[in-house]
Image (tube, rainbow, N blue to C red):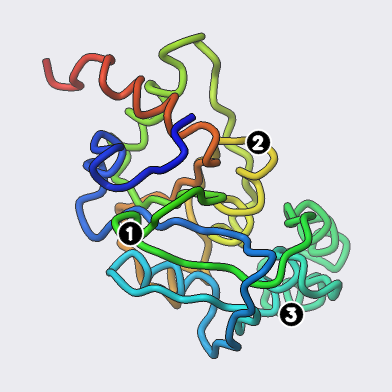
Amino acid sequence: MSEYLNKLSIPNIAGLMEIGEPVCITFEDSISGEKSNLLYCELVQKARNGECFCVSVQKCPVGAYVLGTSDKTPQEYYFKSGRYLNMEAASCASESLPRVEKKYNSILFEPLSKNKGKFSVLILYLKPESAMRLVQAYSYSDGTRVLIDTVGAASICGDCTALPLDKGFVLSFGCKGSRKHSRYQDIEVPVGIAFELVDKIEEGLGNIPSTWK
């Protein structure tokens, strides 16, 4: 694994995004971040477009639970929102959410071109064909299948941040909250990649055949 990564060193991955840049998420132990009035997914979207943030508190209560800064589950909120048939279903969905287990002081959000060192997770917003190529690149060296693990909720904080810390590479279809508040395109699917897999996927992208040839 390379010690340092930037937009030039992983051009195959960076080139898959048509709007903005991949976003580096870093869980920091020593840096004290600021309190933000933005939701986690909004911070990621702004970082995609070139801004940097170091945040200890973000505004989304579901995000706070998933990111491990709150122990209040979103089951009541999920039930009242009408997303689930009853409280039992809402509770099941809430309990299924991935969570960040590691201890940290703040989260650093950066576009890939501004990252100068090791990050925790890389988040991309891709059209389906580009997401397909990521899957093919991941499978290039050993034929491993990629499983999609989602409940259609907490997609950016859960599916694309917390889950890759455990599973490595995760595709999501997004969620109502992140699509409503951060406004990524209907034709885009969010993807999360753990730092440790970036070199593997970059190499795969450089070797797999073009989709259209």
Q: Which amino acid, by three-letter code, is at mark 1?
A: Asp
At 61% from the left and 43% from the top, the residue drawn is 164
- Residue 39 at x, y = what percent? 54, 79
Q: Callout 3: 10 Å neighbours few (<14), some, many (20+)?
A: few
At 38% from the left and 21% from the top, the residue drawn is 136
At 62% from the left and 60% from the top, the residue drawn is 27
Q: Quadrant of residue 149?
A: top right
* Residues under numbered marks 2 and 1 in contact, where contact means CB atoms less than 8 Å apart: no
Q: Is residue 161 left or right of residue 202?
A: right
Which quadrant is the C terminus positioned in?
top left
Relative to residue 181, is residue 86 depicted above or below?
Answer: above
Relative to residue 115, is residue 31 depicted above or below?
Answer: below
Separation of residues labelled 3 and 2 (CA atoms): 31 Å
- Residue 26 at x, y = what percent? 55, 58
Q: Callout 1: 10 Å neighbours few (<14), some, many (20+)?
A: few
Relative to residue 11, is residue 163 depicted above or below?
Answer: below
Q: Which residue is mark 2?
A: 167
Which tag, 3 or 2, sits closer to the chain's start? 3
Callout in the foreground (3, 2): 2
Mark carried by residue 80: 3
Q: Which amino acid, by three-letter code, is at mark 2?
A: Lys
> In what element is the residue under mark 2?
helix
Callout in the foreground (2, 1): 2
Relative to residue 11, is residue 90 depicted above or below?
Answer: below
Q: Which residue is mark 1?
A: 186
Q: Callout 2: 10 Å neighbours few (<14), some, many (20+)?
A: some
- Residue 53 at x, y = what percent? 46, 76
Which tag, 1 or 3, sits closer to the chain's start? 3
Q: Which amino acid, by three-letter code, is at mark 3?
A: Lys
Separation of residues labelled 1 and 3 (CA atoms): 25 Å
Separation of residues labelled 2 and 1 (CA atoms): 25 Å
